[in-house]
Image (spheres, rainbow, N blue to C red):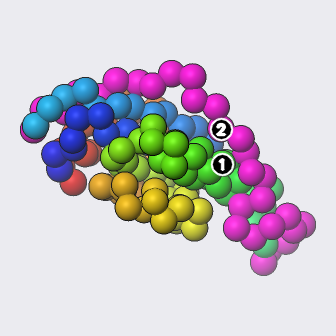
Amino acid sequence: MILPQGTVVAVTDGEKLDLYRNNGSGPELSLSLIHGVSIVDEAKGSGGRHGSTSANPDDSQLAEDGFSAGIAQYLNKQVLEGEIEHLAIISAPRSLGELRKHYHKFLAAKLLLEIPKELTGHSVEDIEKAVLGA
């Protein structure tokens, strides 16, 4: 997929977030890391705080869900403040599902691409390949 210049690409897995900005134009994709992003862990996920049992998610899953909610809150704020004009999200499938629960309608309108794939910790080249292949 061709992303417009300035598109923000969020790469996450529920524990880590890397944000990139596309500096390329036209069919050229050139992602550069955005530094200084701080996420507030919402620590509640979609299911609230329950004890761990076989029917409830464990504490680590609740923490991942809370982090995903924090990412969505951060991205929503950036969209509402006009800092993000176009957005692409690459996320582990379960984390992507949690993110979607928290999208603001304006974020959903700015979203150009979602890729349900685990790419945190991968090279920029791998991320660019995934975007171009979408």
42 versus 40 height, above or below: below
Amino acid identity at mark 1: Gly
70 versus 29 height, above or below: below
- Name the magenta segment's main secondary structure: loop
Secondary structure, mark 2, is loop
Look at the image and tell me in which quarter the C terminus lies.
Answer: bottom left
Q: Marks 1 and 2, Cα distance to the nearest angstrom?
A: 6 Å
**Residue 32, image x and y in percent?**
34, 24
Give left or right: position of 79 versus 20.
right
The residue to which callout 1 is attached is: 70
Is disc 1 surrounded by few (<14), some (14 to 19) or many (20+) residues within 10 Å?
A: many
Residue farthest front in this picture: 81
Residue 102, label in figure: none
Is disc 2 surrounded by few (<14), some (14 to 19) or many (20+) residues within 10 Å?
A: some
Q: Which residues are magenta?
A: 27-55
Amino acid identity at mark 2: Ile
The residue to which callout 2 is attached is: 39
Give left or right: position of 91 versus 67.
left
Give left or right: position of 97 versus 23.
right
Ranked by sequence position, the earlier of labels 1 and 2 is: 2
User: Which residue occupies 37% across, 55% down?
Assistant: 110
- Is residue 115 visible from the viewing direction of this image? no
**Residue 91, image x and y in percent?**
45, 51
Secondary structure, mark 1, is helix
**Residue 13, image x and y in percent?**
53, 47
Q: Is there CB contact under 8 Å for labels 1 and 2?
A: yes
